[in-house]
Amino acid sequence: MRASLMAMALATLAGSTMAADLRVGTNAAYEPFEYKTASGEIVGFDIDIANALCEQLKRKCVFVESEFDSVIPGLQARKFDVIISSISITPERQRVVDFTKRYYKTPSAIVVKKTTKYDGPASLKGMKIGVLKGSTQEKWAMGELKTAGVNVVSYQSQNQVYLDLHAGRLDGTVADKVEVQGGFLRKPEGKDYGYVGPDQYDVKYYGEGIGIAMRKGQKELKQQLDEAIDTIRKNGTYGKIAKKYFDFDPYGQ
């Protein structure tokens, strides 16, 4: 009897371990990837992808909010298990965390007033360009714009960038083209702004695409998530989620 009870207890423990929540770090101020509704619910492409992956892993996603420049320190401090927050796979980040394979890849671009004449970074000299602190766009702006005399201003949230753009405290931003389209350009306050210059894919700054970050050495979790990404790509789930937010395949080439 005791042996049977022990076996049942161990089975229950194993089941609860398999079904443990997956704590997901995210910065919910990056529409349409992760953002809050009026009721405070966190939604978006990344959130739907995370939930689809958790379904494959038979785990429940629990989302933990963080400032973007604090997500990697938060991961290392075990505040969450993974980061699913439009975080680019770059060599710099790969030195401190591991990544899954990419699950999307979209370009970034400069956004300024439509009346701005642009023929290279030097044409923006003296302007104030807002970027998300800790982002690959910040890295690009510091490397390509600041060196040309542009005043690059870093913000804790991309939404704060848009507020200051609308208020006239900034002249432009560098942002993911999909995010800035949904978060600013398609809204009334963005009607006077547009893209200048080429799409930005430079691997030196932007890496290989967007992946899921986890602490170093979690080989089993990485394998599970890689396999789950492949599965939702093959079974149509990824495509259904993408169509909710985009009119193209965000997975990229």
Image (spheres, rainbow, N blue to C red):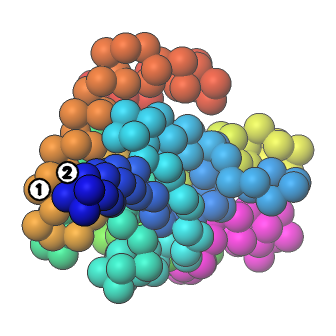
Quarter of the image with the C terminus is top left
Local crowd size for mark 2, using a 10 Å CA cut-off: few (<14), some (14–19), many (≥20): many
Tell me what residue is drawn at x 40 percent, y 40 percent. Answer: 58
- Residue 192's spot in the image, x, y percent? 80, 46
On screen, residue 209 versus residue 25, left or right, reads left
Please report contact status of discs 1 and 2: CB closer than 8 Å, yes or no: yes
The residue indicated by pointer 1 is 219
Local crowd size for mark 1, using a 10 Å CA cut-off: few (<14), some (14–19), many (≥20): few
Please say if 230 is above or below 109: above
Question: For residue 40, which quarter of the picture?
Answer: bottom right
What amino acid does circle 2 point to?
A: Lys
**Label 1: which secondary element:** helix
Confirm whether residue 105 shows in the render: no
Tell me what residue is drawn at x 73 percent, y 49 percent. Answer: 184
Quarter of the image with the N terminus is bottom left
The residue at the far front in this view is 1
**Label 2: which secondary element:** helix
Number of marks in the rendered image: 2
What amino acid does circle 1 point to?
A: Lys
- Residue 178's spot in the image, x, y percent? 56, 39
Please say if 153 is above or below 177: below
The residue indicated by pointer 2 is 222
On screen, residue 185 versus residue 247, left or right, reads right
Question: For residue 83, which quarter of the picture?
Answer: bottom left
Tell me what residue is drawn at x 56 percent, y 61 percent. Answer: 63
In the image, is residue 130 part of the stretch drawn in magenta?
A: no
Q: Distance between the residues labelled 1 and 2?
A: 5 Å
- Per the rendered image, the range of residues in magenta is 148-170
- Residue 234's spot in the image, x, y percent? 31, 15
